[in-house]
């Protein structure tokens, strides 16, 4: 992967770069704030960046610069995956970010990533177009969601499956988490699609649409 990093902490930025390059990936941009990242990505030589790792609170105000930069990046470079990697959940802007098209997006909390392999796996999945959400982020986003009448139709188990889908889990990972068979998970997902009014004609996007309804965005 070709990776860009936006992180105001020099130690963390350099550590992430060394970690990624040590795993065979190439870090092509290192920036200390969102604006510097966006300027670097305007360079036509950076068009083949696969994924960006971006903090939320960066200079100059250390409030929401990172995630607002992510919103801008999503508009100008929609093909680039984005991993928001922060200590904080900025619910308002995160909801906006995932409301458009969540494929190739992720949001992980720094203090909840226990293994390097977990971080690398998340980046690779995002670069491949998947959605990766920390369960705590999902919980916070649900907390600010609007009323979702369709979701109330789901059983407790169906909601559990949908929450795991919102975290970017595959059917196999859901099976492992719930200790059920693949067929059982497929039945739950089919029921979820029906109750949320997502018809087969919606194609492969039904999973994403179901997650968006779950998050209320």
Image: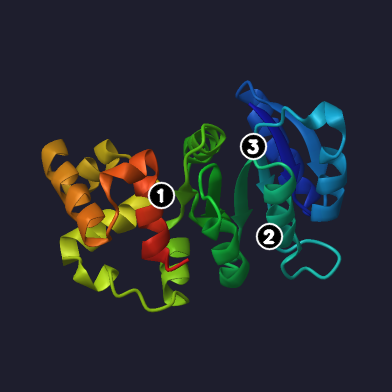
Corner quadrant of residue 94 = bottom right
Q: Tell me how far mark 3 sits from mark 2, CA to CA.
A: 17 Å
**Residue 33 appears in the figure:** no
Task: Identify the residue shown where x is 82% and y is 70%.
Answer: 61
Check disc 2 and report its element: helix, strand or loop. helix
Task: Identify the residue shown where x is 70% and y is 50%.
Answer: 75
Instruction: Nearest to the eye among marks 2 and 1: give it.
Output: 1
Check disc 3 and report its element: helix, strand or loop. loop
Instruction: Nearest to the eye among marks 3 and 2: give it.
Output: 3
Q: Which residue is mark 3?
A: 79
Residue 173: x and y, percent?
A: 28, 40
Q: Nearer the viewer, residue 83 or 185?
A: 185
Q: Tell me how far mark 1 sits from mark 3, CA to CA.
A: 17 Å
**Residue 158 appears in the figure:** yes
**Outermost residue, front side:** 201
Comes first in the chain, label 3 or label 2: 2
Q: Which residue is mark 1?
A: 208
- Disc on res. 67: 2
């Amino acid at each position: 992967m070709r990776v860009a990093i936006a992180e105001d902490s020099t130690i963390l930025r350099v550590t992430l770069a060394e970690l990624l390059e040590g795993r065979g990936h190439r870090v092509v941009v290192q920036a200390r704030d969102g604006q510097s990242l966006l300027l670097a990505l305007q360079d036509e030589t950076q068009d083949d960046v696969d994924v960006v790792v971006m903090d939320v609170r960066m200079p100059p105000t250390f409030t929401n610069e990172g995630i607002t930069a992510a919103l801008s990046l999503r508009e100008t470079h929609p093909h680039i995956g984005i991993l928001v990697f922060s200590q904080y959940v900025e619910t308002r802007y995160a909801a906006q970010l995932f409301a458009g098209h969540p494929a190739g997006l992720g949001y992980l909390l720094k203090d909840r990533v226990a293994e390097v392999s977990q971080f690398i796996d998340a980046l690779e999945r995002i670069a491949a177009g998947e959605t990766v959400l920390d369960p705590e982020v999902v919980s916070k986003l649900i907390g600010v969601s609007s009323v979702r009448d369709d979701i109330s139709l789901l059983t407790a188990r169906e909601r559990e499956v949908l929450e795991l889908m919102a975290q970017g889990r595959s059917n196999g990972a859901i099976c492992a988490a719930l200790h059920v068979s693949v067929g059982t998970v497929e039945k739950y997902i089919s029921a979820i699609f029906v109750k949320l009014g997502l018809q087969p004609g919606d194609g492969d996007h039904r999973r994403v649409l179901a997650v968006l309804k779950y998050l209320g965005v």
